[in-house]
C-alpha cells in the first residue's frame, strides 16, 4: 500500500509500498522510528484513511467488507490519542462496545475483570480527566479487548506505563492472540518485541521482516 499526504507544496510519502499479512492467532510487533509511518499504517488498516495505491483485504468472516464498517467485535483499535469518551466514566468507556452491540449485561463481568487485571477497578466511576494518562491508556486497551475482536490494532499501547503495568497489558494482548485475534501493535517497547510472534521494522514508509539491527 502507498499513502501520501500533502503538506502545502510538499508531498509526504508516509507509506512507500507496504506489504504485510497478519494471520488470526498471531501477535505482530511493528517497530520503527518516529515518523516512519506506523500510525499511518494502522489508520489504513482500521479504515480511517484509504490507500492511494495498493489494496487492503480482510479474509475469513471479514472478507468483502470495508474496515470503516466493521464493529468492535470485528476490529478494535487503541489509538495513540486513546479516544476515550470524556463524559463517560472509565467503566462505561470499557463497556461502550458492548453497549453499542446490545450486549451490555453479558459483558459486565468481563469489563470488571479487565479493569481489575489492569489495576484500574478502583477508578471505575471516575471520568477520563480524573485519571492519569497511564490509567486512561489501560482503560483504552480494556475497551479494545472487551469483545475479543478478530483484529486488534494498538498504537504504542504501553507508552505511558511502568514495566509492571506494561507487562500486564502485554499479557492481555498475548492472550488475545492465543484466543484467535490477529494482533498488530506499533511499539517502541523492546520487551514487547520479545513477546511477539513476529517483528516487523518500519523505516521511511517501508516494512521489512525482523527487528532492525
Ligand atoms: N495528516 C498528515 N498530513 C501530512 N503529513 C502527515 C500526516 N500524517 C502523518 N504525516 C507524516 O507521515 C509520516 C508518517 O507519520 P506517522 O504518524 O505514520 O509516523 P509514526 O511512525 O507513527 O510516528 P510516531 O512513532 O512518532 O507516532 C511523517 O512524516 C508524518 O509527518
Image (tube, grey):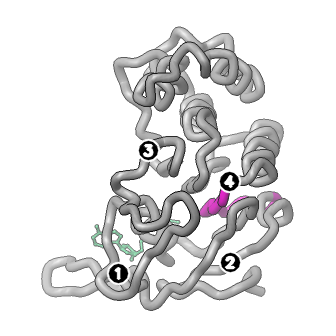
Give the residue pinned by disc 4.
181
Element class at badge 1 = strand
- Which residue is nearer to you in this view: 130 or 85? 85
Element class at badge 3 = loop
Q: Quadrant of ligand 1?
A: bottom left
Q: CA distance from mark 1 to mark 4?
A: 26 Å
Residue appearing at x 77%, y 27% in the figure:
117
Give the residue pinned by disc 2.
200
Nearer to us of marks 1 and 3 is 3
Residue appearing at x 81%, y 68% in the figure:
197
Sequence-wise first label, 2 or 4: 4
Q: With 166 as the anchor, is 101 left or right in this view?
A: left
Q: With 147 as the anchor, is 14 left or right in this view?
A: left
- Whether disc 1's CB lies below 8 Å from ligand 1 is answered no
Q: Give the x, y percent position of residue 163.
A: 80, 43
Q: CA distance from mark 1 to mark 2?
A: 18 Å
Sequence-wise first label, 3 or 2: 3
Q: Is residue 130 above or below residue 171?
A: above
Q: Say whether marks 1 and 3 touch (CB < 8 Å).
A: no
Q: Quadrant of the C terminus?
A: bottom right
Give the residue pinned by disc 3.
71
- Residue neighbourhood size for the residue with mark 1, other residues' Cα within 10 Å, grouped as few (<14), some (14–19), many (≥20): many
Element class at badge 2 = strand
Q: Give the x, y percent position of residue 143.
A: 56, 33
Give the residue pinned by disc 1.
3
Sequence-wise first label, 1 or 3: 1
Amino acid at each position: 500500500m502507498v499513502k501520501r499526504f500533502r503538506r502545502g507544496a510538499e508531498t509526504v510519502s508516509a507509506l512507500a509500498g507496504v506489504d504485510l499479512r497478519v494471520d488470526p492467532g498471531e501477535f505482530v510487533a511493528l517497530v520503527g522510528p518516529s515518523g516512519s509511518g506506523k500510525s499511518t499504517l494502522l489508520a489504513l488498516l482500521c479504515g480511517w484513511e484509504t490507500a492511494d495505491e495498493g489494496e487492503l483485504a480482510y479474509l475469513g468472516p471479514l472478507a468483502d467488507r470495508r474496515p470503516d464498517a466493521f464493529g468492535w467485535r470485528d476490529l478494535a483499535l487503541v489509538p495513540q490519542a486513546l479516544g476515550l469518551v470524556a463524559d463517560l466514566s472509565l467503566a462505561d468507556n470499557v463497556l461502550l462496545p458492548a453497549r453499542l452491540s446490545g450486549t451490555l449485561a453479558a459483558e459486565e463481568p468481563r469489563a470488571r475483570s479487565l479493569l481489575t487485571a489492569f489495576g484500574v477497578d478502583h477508578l471505575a466511576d471516575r471520568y477520563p480527566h480524573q485519571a492519569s494518562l497511564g490509567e486512561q491508556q489501560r482503560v483504552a486497551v480494556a475497551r479494545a479487548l472487551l469483545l475479543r475482536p478478530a483484529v486488534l490494532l494498538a498504537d504504542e499501547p504501553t507508552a505511558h506505563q511502568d514495566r509492571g503495568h506494561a507487562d500486564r497489558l502485554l499479557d492481555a494482548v498475548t492472550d488475545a492472540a492465543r484466543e484467535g485475534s490477529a494482533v498488530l501493535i506499533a511499539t517502541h517497547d523492546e520487551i514487547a518485541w520479545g513477546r511477539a510472534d513476529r517483528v516487523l521494522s518500519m523505516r521511511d514508509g517501508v516494512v521489512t521482516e525482523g527487528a532492525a539491527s
